[in-house]
């Protein structure tokens, strides 16, 4: 396949993939993930959970669709880390179930929800980029899985015939961590994750409808007005991520400084620091000097140290030089 530059998948979800004419792209992605090439999307479900447009939750794209098996498939793309992310997934899936279960309805008709998260940040600690989770019950003593079945009528027979199949009613969760993906294609879904990460189709991709994705998501197809809005979205996304990363770094620096200052507030700190600090340093470092030296060792900038110590930057540099450091000018 050619290396056509594609628009970001999160932007596509906000715009062209909401068009019924482009459902085939979503069907290709979902078929690869769920390993079912027969998936057919019937419609996009309008609900409180189904958001669209630039004023949505912070950099989040939500899409709720219904397939031919009456499953509710909730797709979320998250560009920035969110506190209590798993809790938010549980809430969203539960809300979808409640929204589509009318009072008085038989519980046998409860909605089957599949939650799919495409995350451009690393959630938790793990060595994989694709995770799956659902509810199962296991014996405490035997560790065997509990199997509950339901009777399903077989259509097309002249007399009533039934088969028993396992019940599968609990929400299923798929977590795709794009940043952990190493651009190695082992299965069909990897071809789509490659698109999420690189905005292009990998050479030799054969997943169902991925050729349609390459054509329909090509940047070259965008009008001038669409290009302007898209460029603005890219700028805002990059700006928001930078703002969060900066806030994290500033919070880290402030936390380190506060920890050092807390020790000073308890009383004048006198201590002997022995060892190698850019060379061997032995001696006494007191009060503010202690804070500056240790803060600098932790990577805090001279500007921040100056503000915390309430002395000018030249004085901070002088203290650091006196203790064997050569700060950048």
Image (tube, helix red, strand yellow):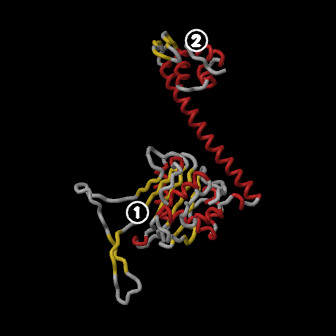
Q: Residue furthest right?
A: 224
Write down the quadrant of residue 148 in the picture: bottom left
Q: CA distance from mark 2 to mark 1?
A: 65 Å
Q: Which residue is mark 1?
A: 170
Q: Is residue 220 visible?
A: yes
Above or below, 287 against 91 in this view is: above
Q: Residues within 10 Å of mark 2 (few under 14, many from 20)?
A: few
Label 2: element kind: helix
Q: Residue furthest left?
A: 141
- The residue positioned 64% from the left and 21% from the top of the image is 328
Quarter placement of the C terminus: top right
Label 1: element kind: loop
Above or below, 183 against 329 in this view is: below
Q: Residues within 10 Å of mark 1 (few under 14, many from 20)?
A: some
**Residue 322, label in figure:** 2
- Out of 157 and 219, give the one closest to the viewer: 219
Residue 143 pos. (x, y %): 26, 56
Q: How many marks?
A: 2
Residue 205 pos. (x, y %): 56, 61
Q: Looking at the image, tell me whether mark 2 or mark 1 is earlier in sequence order.
A: 1
């Amino acid at each position: 396949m050619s290396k056509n530059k594609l628009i970001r998948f999160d932007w596509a979800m906000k715009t062209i993939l909401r068009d019924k004419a482009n459902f085939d792209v979503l069907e290709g992605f979902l078929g690869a993930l769920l390993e079912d090439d027969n998936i057919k999307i019937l419609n996009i479900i309008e609900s409180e959970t189904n958001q669209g447009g630039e004023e949505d939750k912070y950099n989040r794209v939500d899409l709720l669709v219904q397939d031919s098996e009456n499953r509710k498939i909730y797709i979320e793309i998250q560009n920035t880390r969110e506190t209590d992310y798993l809790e938010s997934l549980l809430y969203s899936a539960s809300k979808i179930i409640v929204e589509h279960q009318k009072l008085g309805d038989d519980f046998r008709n409860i909605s089957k929800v599949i939650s799919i998260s495409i995350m451009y940040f690393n959630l938790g600690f793990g060595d994989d980029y694709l995770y799956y989770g659902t509810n199962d019950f296991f014996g405490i003593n035997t560790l065997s899985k509990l199997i509950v079945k339901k009777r399903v009528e077989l259509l097309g027979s002249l007399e009533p015939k039934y088969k028993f199949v396992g019940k599968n009613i609990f929400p299923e969760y798929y977590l795709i961590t794009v940043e952990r993906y190493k651009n190695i294609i082992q299965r069909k879904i990897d071809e789509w994750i490659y698109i999420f990460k690189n905005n292009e189709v990998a050479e030799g991709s054969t997943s169902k409808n991925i050729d349609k994705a390459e054509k329909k998501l090509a940047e070259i197809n965008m009008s001038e007005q669409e290009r302007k809005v898209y460029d603005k979205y890219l700028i805002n996304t990059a700006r928001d991520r930078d703002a969060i990363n900066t806030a994290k770094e500033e919070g880290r620096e402030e936390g380190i400084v506060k920890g050092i200052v807390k020790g000073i507030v308890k009383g004048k700190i006198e201590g002997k620091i022995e060892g190698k600090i850019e060379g061997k340093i032995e001696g006494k470092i007191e009060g503010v000097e202690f804070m500056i030296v240790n803060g600098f060792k932790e990577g805090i900038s001279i500007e921040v140290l100056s503000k915390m110590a309430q002395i000018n930057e030249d004085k901070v540099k002088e203290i650091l030089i006196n203790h064997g450091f050569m700060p950048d000018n």
